[in-house]
Amino acid sequence: MNYFKNENDEIFAYDDEQIAQGYGSDLTSITVAEKEVIVNPPKTQAELNEIARQKAKATRDNALEANTYTLSDGSVYQVRPKDLPNFQTAIQLGVDTDWVLADNSVRLTTVAELQEILNAGVTQAKTIYDNYMVTLKSIGV
Protein backbone atom coordinates (compact mmCIF):
# COMPACT_ATOMS: atom_id res chain seq x y z
CA MET A 1 0.00 0.00 0.00
CA ASN A 2 1.20 3.50 -0.85
CA TYR A 3 0.17 6.44 1.30
CA PHE A 4 -0.36 10.05 0.32
CA LYS A 5 -1.65 13.19 1.95
CA ASN A 6 -3.15 16.43 0.72
CA GLU A 7 -2.56 19.94 2.07
CA ASN A 8 -5.13 19.28 4.85
CA ASP A 9 -3.29 16.14 6.03
CA GLU A 10 -6.08 13.90 4.76
CA ILE A 11 -4.65 10.44 4.10
CA PHE A 12 -5.14 8.46 0.89
CA ALA A 13 -3.99 4.91 0.24
CA TYR A 14 -3.49 3.41 -3.21
CA ASP A 15 -2.16 0.06 -4.33
CA ASP A 16 0.46 -0.24 -7.08
CA GLU A 17 -2.18 -0.73 -9.80
CA GLN A 18 -3.95 2.49 -8.78
CA ILE A 19 -0.60 4.33 -8.74
CA ALA A 20 0.06 3.08 -12.29
CA GLN A 21 -3.31 4.57 -13.28
CA GLY A 22 -2.22 7.97 -11.93
CA TYR A 23 -3.92 7.99 -8.55
CA GLY A 24 -2.07 10.11 -6.02
CA SER A 25 -0.13 12.08 -8.61
CA ASP A 26 -1.48 15.36 -7.20
CA LEU A 27 -0.74 14.35 -3.59
CA THR A 28 2.36 14.21 -1.39
CA SER A 29 3.77 10.72 -0.90
CA ILE A 30 4.32 9.79 2.76
CA THR A 31 5.79 6.85 4.64
CA VAL A 32 3.83 4.48 6.86
CA ALA A 33 5.43 6.15 9.90
CA GLU A 34 4.34 9.60 8.69
CA LYS A 35 0.81 8.27 8.12
CA GLU A 36 0.71 6.88 11.67
CA VAL A 37 1.73 10.25 13.15
CA ILE A 38 -1.05 11.99 11.20
CA VAL A 39 -3.67 9.36 12.07
CA ASN A 40 -2.53 8.98 15.70
CA PRO A 41 -0.83 12.23 16.66
CA PRO A 42 1.26 12.20 19.84
CA LYS A 43 -0.65 13.24 22.93
CA THR A 44 -0.08 16.68 24.39
CA GLN A 45 1.22 17.03 27.94
CA ALA A 46 -2.25 18.15 29.00
CA GLU A 47 -3.76 14.97 27.50
CA LEU A 48 -1.13 12.81 29.20
CA ASN A 49 -1.83 14.57 32.52
CA GLU A 50 -5.57 13.95 32.11
CA ILE A 51 -4.97 10.26 31.39
CA ALA A 52 -2.78 10.03 34.50
CA ARG A 53 -5.42 11.89 36.55
CA GLN A 54 -8.17 9.52 35.38
CA LYS A 55 -5.98 6.51 36.21
CA ALA A 56 -5.24 7.91 39.68
CA LYS A 57 -8.94 8.58 40.23
CA ALA A 58 -9.83 5.00 39.22
CA THR A 59 -7.14 3.65 41.57
CA ARG A 60 -8.55 5.81 44.38
CA ASP A 61 -12.13 4.72 43.71
CA ASN A 62 -11.17 1.03 43.54
CA ALA A 63 -9.27 1.31 46.82
CA LEU A 64 -12.22 3.01 48.51
CA GLU A 65 -14.61 0.30 47.25
CA ALA A 66 -12.28 -2.40 48.57
CA ASN A 67 -11.86 -0.73 51.98
CA THR A 68 -12.39 -3.24 54.79
CA TYR A 69 -11.58 -3.57 58.46
CA THR A 70 -10.97 -6.82 60.32
CA LEU A 71 -11.85 -7.19 63.99
CA SER A 72 -9.62 -9.24 66.29
CA ASP A 73 -11.91 -12.28 65.86
CA GLY A 74 -11.33 -12.22 62.06
CA SER A 75 -14.69 -10.69 61.14
CA VAL A 76 -14.24 -8.53 58.04
CA TYR A 77 -16.39 -5.43 57.63
CA GLN A 78 -16.74 -3.36 54.49
CA VAL A 79 -16.11 0.31 55.17
CA ARG A 80 -16.76 1.83 51.78
CA PRO A 81 -17.90 5.46 51.55
CA LYS A 82 -21.46 4.29 50.94
CA ASP A 83 -21.35 2.23 54.18
CA LEU A 84 -20.36 5.10 56.48
CA PRO A 85 -23.89 6.51 56.98
CA ASN A 86 -25.06 3.05 58.06
CA PHE A 87 -22.32 2.90 60.69
CA GLN A 88 -23.12 6.42 61.89
CA THR A 89 -26.83 5.67 62.17
CA ALA A 90 -26.26 2.40 64.05
CA ILE A 91 -23.86 4.12 66.45
CA GLN A 92 -26.33 6.95 67.08
CA LEU A 93 -29.07 4.42 67.89
CA GLY A 94 -26.76 3.08 70.59
CA VAL A 95 -27.77 -0.57 70.39
CA ASP A 96 -25.85 -3.64 69.36
CA THR A 97 -26.79 -4.58 65.80
CA ASP A 98 -26.77 -7.59 63.53
CA TRP A 99 -24.35 -6.56 60.77
CA VAL A 100 -23.77 -8.12 57.37
CA LEU A 101 -20.06 -8.76 56.95
CA ALA A 102 -17.96 -8.64 53.78
CA ASP A 103 -18.57 -12.38 53.20
CA ASN A 104 -22.34 -11.84 53.64
CA SER A 105 -22.44 -13.67 56.96
CA VAL A 106 -24.19 -11.91 59.85
CA ARG A 107 -22.61 -11.06 63.18
CA LEU A 108 -23.99 -9.28 66.22
CA THR A 109 -21.80 -6.20 66.47
CA THR A 110 -21.52 -3.96 69.51
CA VAL A 111 -21.74 -0.19 69.34
CA ALA A 112 -18.10 0.00 70.46
CA GLU A 113 -17.06 -2.32 67.64
CA LEU A 114 -19.06 -0.26 65.13
CA GLN A 115 -17.26 2.86 66.34
CA GLU A 116 -13.89 1.09 66.04
CA ILE A 117 -14.72 -0.04 62.50
CA LEU A 118 -15.97 3.41 61.50
CA ASN A 119 -12.86 5.13 62.90
CA ALA A 120 -10.56 2.67 61.14
CA GLY A 121 -12.47 2.99 57.87
CA VAL A 122 -12.31 6.77 57.94
CA THR A 123 -8.58 6.64 58.71
CA GLN A 124 -8.00 4.21 55.84
CA ALA A 125 -10.06 6.38 53.48
CA LYS A 126 -8.01 9.42 54.48
CA THR A 127 -4.83 7.53 53.60
CA ILE A 128 -6.32 6.61 50.23
CA TYR A 129 -7.24 10.24 49.56
CA ASP A 130 -3.81 11.42 50.74
CA ASN A 131 -2.14 9.02 48.28
CA TYR A 132 -4.45 10.30 45.54
CA MET A 133 -3.43 13.89 46.29
CA VAL A 134 0.27 12.98 46.20
CA THR A 135 -0.28 11.38 42.80
CA LEU A 136 -2.16 14.44 41.51
CA LYS A 137 0.65 16.72 42.65
CA SER A 138 3.25 14.49 40.98
CA ILE A 139 1.48 14.88 37.62
CA GLY A 140 1.05 18.60 38.06
CA VAL A 141 -2.69 18.76 38.62
Image (cartoon, rainbow, N blue to C red):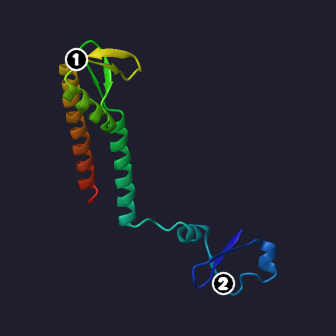
Image quadrant occupied by the C terminus:
bottom left
Disc 1 from disc 2: Cα separation: 78 Å
Q: Position of residue 117 (x, y in %)?
A: 23, 26
Q: Which residue is mark 1?
A: 110
Q: In this figure, which residue is indicated by the disc labeled 2? A: 27
Residue placed most toward the observer, 105 or 17:
105
Q: Is residue 60 left or right of residue 116?
A: right
Local secondary structure at mark 1 = loop
- Look at the numbered disc 2 and give the secondary structure of its residue: loop
Q: Name the residue: 35% across, 43% down.
A: 61
Residue 69 visible somewhere in the drawing: yes
Q: Residue at x 23, y 14 (%)?
A: 72
Q: Residues within 10 Å of mark 1 (few under 14, many from 20)?
A: some
Residue depicted at x 35% and y 49%: 57
**Residue at the extreme top of the image, as rendered:** 73
Residue furthest front in the image: 93
State which quadrant residue 51 falls in: bottom left
**In this view, 76 is above or below 37:** above
Residue type indicated by callout 1: Thr
Q: Between residues 21 and 141, which one lies in front from this camera angle?
A: 141
Camera-side residue: 64 or 1? 64
Tell me where residue 95 appears, x and y as whole percent: 22, 20
**Location of residue 64 in the rendering, given as x and y in whole percent from the top left corner:** 32, 38
* Vertical position of residue 30 compared to residue 141: above or below: below
Decide: is 49 above or below 81: below
Please name which of the two marks, 1 or 2, marks the residue nearer to the observer.
1
Q: Locate the N terminus and report the quarter of the image it occupies.
A: bottom right
Please say if 25 is above or below 48. Answer: below
Sequence-wise, which precedes: disc 1 or disc 2? 2
Left or right: where 60 falls relative to 27: left
Q: Amino acid at mark 2?
A: Leu
